[in-house]
Amino acid sequence: MSIINKIIKFSIIIISIILTFLSALVQAKDPPQTSIVYTKHNLSGSLSRWPSPSNTVKAIYEPEICIFCHTPHNANPVQPLWNHELSAVQTYKVYWSNTLQSYTEAESQAWNIDGFSKLCLSCHDGTVAVGSVNSRWEEILMNISNCIDSSGKLIPGSGCSGYIGTDLSGGHPISIVYDNSLVSKRNNSNITNSCWLNPPPSNRTSYVKLYPTQNQGGGMGVQCTSCHNPHTNRSLEENNGVKWPPFWQGTSYNDVCFVCHYNDCGESYKIWPY
């Protein structure tokens, strides 16, 4: 072998070592603080490089983070790459009150929870084990705590904010079409002492987005993911000493609410015009 060939071979070896070292450095870099790694949606266990930060809802050993919701194979076609078993609940108790001014009680109770909200509730309604995923032959073993029972399901308990249950009557309507027809119906009504609605937000420019629903004939509407981003860590930040709501889409309460609700309401903001 000539000297030149030896030099070339040696150079290739050195370059390979350097690239391997640099690759290891890149892989060793911690995710940004806004990553799901640092949120309560990281449910991974003790074998994970970044184990769950939660003391109450987490797997015992599971090394993967995304697996609880997503999988590249054997996914549920309800949504791309969806991995978690869906809840069998057909009817939830949904929001209605005298301030639900655009719909009757019968109309609102006829809505079915669907779309992205149905995916969220596959864990949060407490009827399906958190570790029940399509891509595994057996359930992922969860750590039993005051928030997780022996069957691996979420339960109500002190500090257990993840449990929502099947009674959704205390929260903002979801799986509800938000279109120009609704805005016109509300804003042209004779109801007083209430806020108007803004035009539907544009999914291309607004961080509060509308998602498909089959209710009311189908269309784009409000789902859990309109106001909450399951992959962010903003709820750990503070705004003037006040923590964000969990997985909040905006930079304040008003930044989200006023996308749809007219922001010049005075005291009438207490009566929301759904």
Image: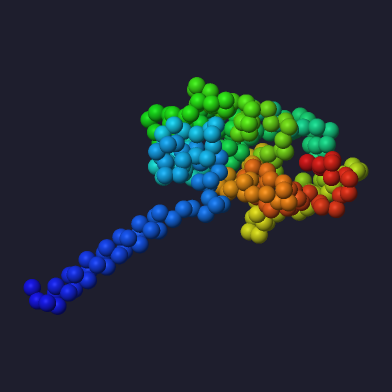
Residue 117 visible from this viewpoint: yes
On the image, the x and y values in percent for residue 84 come to 49, 35
Which residue sits at x=17%, y=70%?
A: 9
Which residue sits at x=38%, y=58%?
A: 25
On the image, the x and y values in percent for residue 55 come to 54, 34
Residue 140, compared with residue 178, is above or below; it is: above
- Say which quadrant the N terminus sits in: bottom left
On the image, the x and y values in percent for residue 204 come to 63, 59
On the image, the x and y values in percent for residue 164 come to 64, 31
Q: Decide which of 96, 124 is in the foreground and name it.
A: 124
* 77 lies left or right of 265: left
Q: Return the residue found at the far top.
A: 150
Q: Decide which of 156, 123 is in the foreground and name it.
A: 156
How is the protein colored in the picture? rainbow
**Total numbered labels placed on residues in the image:** 0
Which residue sits at x=42%, y=44%?
A: 49
Residue 73, compared with residue 208, is above or below; it is: above
Residue 222 visible from this viewpoint: no
* 130 lies left or right of 101: left
Which residue sits at x=80%, y=37%?
A: 100
Q: Return the residue found at the far left.
A: 1
- Say which quadrant the C terminus sits in: top right
Residue 65, compared with residue 3, is above or below; it is: above
